Image (spheres, coloured by chain):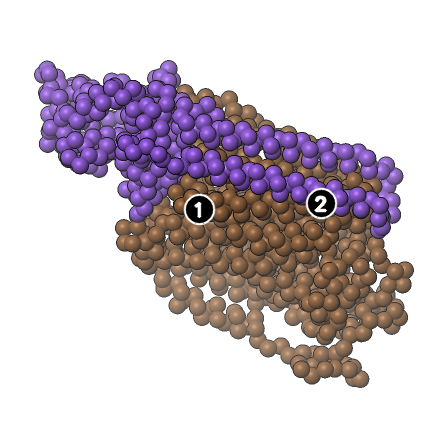
Chain colours: A purple, B brown
Amino acid sequence: MNPGGLLAQAAPLDPGRHLILHPGAPQGSHIEWLYWLIFWILAVVYVLMIVAFTRAGARSRADFIQPLPVMKNEEGDRKARWAVGSAVAITVITLFVVLVLSVITGKQVAGLTSKNPVTIQIMGHQWWWEVTYPNPQADQTVITANEIHVPVCTPVVVLTNSSDVIHSFWAPSITGKRDLLPGYSSAFWFQVDQPGTYRGQCAEFCGLQHAHMGFSVIAEPVDQFQAWQQQQLKTAAEPSDDEASRGRAVFLTHACLMCHTIRGTDAGSRAGPDLTHIGSRRMLAAETLPNTRGALAGWILDPQRIKPGAEMPPNSLAPDDLQALITYLMSLQ
Amino acid sequence: MAVSEPIIANEKDLGDSELSRRLAHTWRQPTGIWGWLSNTHHTTIGLRFMVTAFIFLALGGVLAAIMRLQLVRPENSLIGPDLYNQIFTMHGSTMIFLFAVPMMFQGFGVYVVPLMCGARNIAFPRLNTFSYYLYLGGGLVLWGGFLTNTGPDVGWFAYVPLSGPQYSPGHRVDVWSQMITFTEVSALGVAVCLATTILRHRAPGMTLNRMPILLWEKLVLSMMVIFAMPAVMVASGLLLLDRLVGTHFFNPAEGGDVLLYQHLFWFFGHPEVYIIFLPGAAIVSTMVSCFSRRRIFGYTPIVVSVVATGFLGFGVWVHHMFATGLPQLSESFFTAASLMIVIPTAVQFFCWVATIWNGKLQMRLPMLWCFGFFFVFLIGGLSGVMLASVPVDTQVHDTYFIIAHFHYVLIGGALFPMFAGIYFWFPKMVGRMPDETLGKWHFWLFLIGFNATFFTMHFLGLRGMTRRVYTYLPDLHWHWLNVLASIGVVFMTAGLLVFLVNVMRCRRLGRVAGNNPWGDSGLEWGTSSPPPAYNFLHLPTVNGRDALWEALPDQPVVVGMRDDIRETLVTHSLDANPQHKDEDPGPSIWPFLAALAVSATFVGSIFTPWAVPIGAPPVIVTLVGWLWPRGHSPPLPGEKTWEH
C-alpha cells in the first residue's frame, strides 16, 4: 500500500482547528487581539512611510541629469529637523504603547488563577507525544499518546519534558507554543472554552519526521472527559472472539511487545506509544493517518514508507495474522 | 623602524605619466597561476569575495527552488526527509555564512573601504588574502560534504541535542561545525583589516567626523564581528568537542545544558542579522545622498544610530528563545530591548526621507533598488516589531510567518541594497556602465517574484504551517498558498538571469564610465575606473564629509610618497593627520599556502585527532614563511626619517 493512497484516505477527516487567528480558547483570543492591535498600528506606520517616500521622491524629482550637489539648504534642513524629530518622538511613544500592551497581554496569557487545574505531563519523543495524567495513586494514572483529552472551561497545567531532542508543543487555535527541552522540566497552562478538536504540531525541528509529529487536543464537557478518563484507566479489554484472541497472540509473539504496552497483557515496554486503548483514538502515527483498518495495516507492515526514519521497523505478518492483529487492536476501546 | 616623513603640498614633482608608469611598475601584481594565488591587492580580493559569494547565492537559490518544488503539493514524494533536511540546512548555512556576510561585509568592505579612505591598499593585505582563501576553503568543504551525502541535516542553527553525537552520528554535523569556524575566522581576519584601514589609512583631512557613513558602518561592523563571532566559535567548538572527543557540554544526560548552546548561538546570531543589514543601510545612505544630489541629512544622527545598533544588537538575542519558557521578567526585558533597536533604524529611515525631500532626485538604476529596499525592508522591519512581543511571538515563532519576516529583512535589507551597490560600483569595478533597461527588468521581475513567494508565507504561518517540514498533510489547506509561493521563485530566477546577462554583457560592451559617472562624492570616484594597482596617482586629501563635492579646485595632494617601493600613508586615527609611512608587504604565496595548511588540518580533524599534530608543522612552516622579517627598504639619500 502506498503512503499517498493512505494519506488520501485522511482527506475527508476534519483535522481539527489549526489557525492562529480564529482561536477557540481565551489565551489564543488575547493573543489574537494583541496581534490585530499591533498589526493596525504598524499598517498605519507603513502607509505613512510609503506616502512619505513617494511624496519626497515626487516633489524632488529632477529631470535634468546630475545637477550640482546642494551643500547648503538651511531652510529645508530646519524644517526637516522638526519633522524628523517629531517622527522619532512618535516612534518612541508608539513603541512604548506596544511594549505596555504586550507585557499586559503576556501577563494575562501566562498567569494562572484557578486552584483546581487538570495536570497533564507531556513528554516529547521522536516523533510522537506521550501524554500522562498523573495521579498520586499509580493505578489512577492515565497514559496515552498523541490525543489529549481535556475538559472545557477548566485550566490545564502542562508539565513539559522530552526524552530525546527538543520538541515544541503548539496548538495554534489554543495558545502559543512551548519548547519541550530535555533536562528542563517546565510548566505552562492553557484552557479551552469551546468543545471540539484542535490540531497541534511539533514546532521545533526535531529530525527526520518533524513534519509528521502532530497531536490533537480534544476538548469536551466535564462529564464526557471524566467518562473518557474512567475508560482509559481500565486495563485492556479481553478479546471477545476467536479472531481477537488470535490477534492478541500475534501481538505477544511478534516484535510489537518489544516496544509497546498493552496493560492487562504481558506487553509492557515503554519505548513506543501505549496501545491499551488504541481503538479509541482518531488518528495513528502522531496525527498522520486516520485510525482505520486499512491505514493501520499499512502502518504495521511498513511504517518506513509513511514516516521514513520513524523508530518503528517494518513487520512481515501473514495476511491472516495481520487481520487478526488489527481486529484485536481495533477492539481496544 | 625608520620611516620617512610625508608632506602635503600643492606642487607635484613629477609628470603624471612618468609617475603612473613608475607606480604601476612598483605596485604590479605577479601574473600566471602562481601570481594569481599570490595577489594581495584589495580590489582583486574584494572582487573574488563578491564573485565567490555570488556563486554561493546562486547555489543557495537552487536549493530554495528545490524546496519550493517539493512543497508545491501535499505529501509530495519528490525528495524524502533526509535530503530535504540537508537541503534546508545547506540553504540557510550557505546564505548566511557563505553569501550574506562574505558579500555584504567582506566583499563590499574589502573592495570599497580602502578606495573610500584614499589608501593604496588595505591594511594587512596578506591577512586579507588569507581570509579569502579560508572562506573559499570553508565553502568548498561544506559543499563537498553535501555533494558526497555528508551535508549537515540539523538546521543552520544546529540545536543540541539533535546535533549531538547521539542523535546525529556520522560526520554531517562535524562538517557544518568546521565550516562555521572557517568562515568566522575569515570574517574576523577581514574585520581586523577593515578596522585598521579605517582607523589608520584615511586620507589626510578625513577626520572621524568627516568619515563617509559607509566607513562608519564598516568600522562598527568590524567591531561587531570581533565581539560576535567568538561566541559562535565557542558554540560550534564545544559541539565539536562533544561530538569528537566525548565531552558533555550539551548532553543533558550527563549534566550538560541544551539552553547554553542556544544562548551562545544567538548571542552571535542576532548581531549577525545586523552585520548583514547595516552594510545594506550604509549603501542606501550613500546612494540616497548621491542620487538626491545633496549631502545626507542628519549625518550625526545616522552615525549615532549605526553605533547604537552595534551596541543594542548584542542585547536582543533572547527574542529567538521566547518559546523556551524563560522567566517573564527577562522576557519583558528582551521585548523592550528588541523594540528599542527599532529606534535607530527608524532614525535612518526618517533621515533618508528628509534627504530625498530636500534634494533633486535622480531615479537612476541604483536608486530604484533603494526604493525597492524602502518598501520591502519596511515590511520585514515592522513585522519584526510584532515578533518582539512575547505573546505574539509564541504563536508565530517557528512558522512560515517567521520565514516571511526574515526574508523581508534579509532580502530586503541585504539583497536589494546589494544589487543597488553592485550597479552603483559596477562602473568603478569594470570601467563600464550597466544597462539601465535590463536593470529595470531585473528589478521588477525580482520584486514581483519576491513578494509572491514571501508575502504569501505570512498567511501560511498564520494558518499554522511550521518551518522545516519536508511535507504537509492535504487536509490542512496549505496547498494553494504553497503553489503561489513556488510560482514566485520562477520570477526571482528570471530576474537573476537578467542580472547575469546584464553583468556579462556590460563588462565588455557597456558604455565607458569615466572616473565618476554618478557624480558621487566618495574618494573612490576620484581615481580612474577601474582603479590602477596603486589606486591613486597622488594620495588625496579631504576638505569635508563629501570629499569630492567639497574639493577645492587646487585641492592639495600628499607628496613625498616614494614611487620605487610600495609605500602607504599612516594617519592618526582621530584627526587623520599624517603620522608616518609604512610599506605594503606586497604579493605573497604564503597566505594561500597557510590557508591550505589550516584548511587541511581543520578538515582532517573531523576524521582523526591525529590531524592536529600532523597538520600543525605545515601550518607553522607557512606562518613562518609568511611572517619572515623582510626588513624595510633603505631610505633615499637625504630623506628625512624618524626613528621609533
2 and 1 marks on the same chain? no
Quadrant assignment, res B368: top right
Q: Is residue A128 visible?
A: no
- Amino acid type shown at disc 2: Gly
In the image, is residue B625 above or below residue B78? below
For mark 2, give the secondary structure. Answer: helix
* Chain to which mark 1 belongs: B
**Residue B523 in sight:** yes
Q: Quadrant of the N terminus of chain B?
A: bottom right
| Crowdedness near tag 2: few (<14), some (14–19) or many (≥20) residues, C-alpha within 10 Å | some
Q: Which residue is mark 1?
A: B329
Residue B301 is situated, as x and y percent measured from the top left of the image, at: 70, 51
Label 1 secondary element: helix
Q: Residue A85 has which mark?
A: 2
Q: Position of residue B47 (x, y in %)?
A: 66, 53
Query: What residue appears at the point 29 percent right and 19 percent down from the top-left corner?
Result: A221
On the picture, is B599 further left or further right than B569? left
Q: Is residue B503 left or right of residue A105?
A: right
Q: Position of residue B106 (x, y in %)?
A: 61, 54
Instruction: Quadrant for residue A271, please give it.
Output: top left
Q: Quadrant of the C terminus of chain B?
A: bottom right
Q: Residues under labels 2 and 1: Cα distance?
A: 31 Å
The answer to whether the residues at label 2 and label 1 have Cβ atoms under 8 Å apart is: no
> How many marks are shown on the rendered structure?
2
Residue B433 higher or lower than A274, as above or below: below
Give the residue at x 71% y 37%: B371
The numbered disc on residue B610 is none
* Residue A203 screen position, x and y as percent: 40, 35
Q: What's the residue type where badge 1 is placed?
A: Leu
Q: Relative to the observer, which residue lies in front, B464 or B487?
A: B464
Residue found at x 51% / y 56%: B229
Please identify the quarter of the rendering in which residue B110 is found. Answer: bottom right
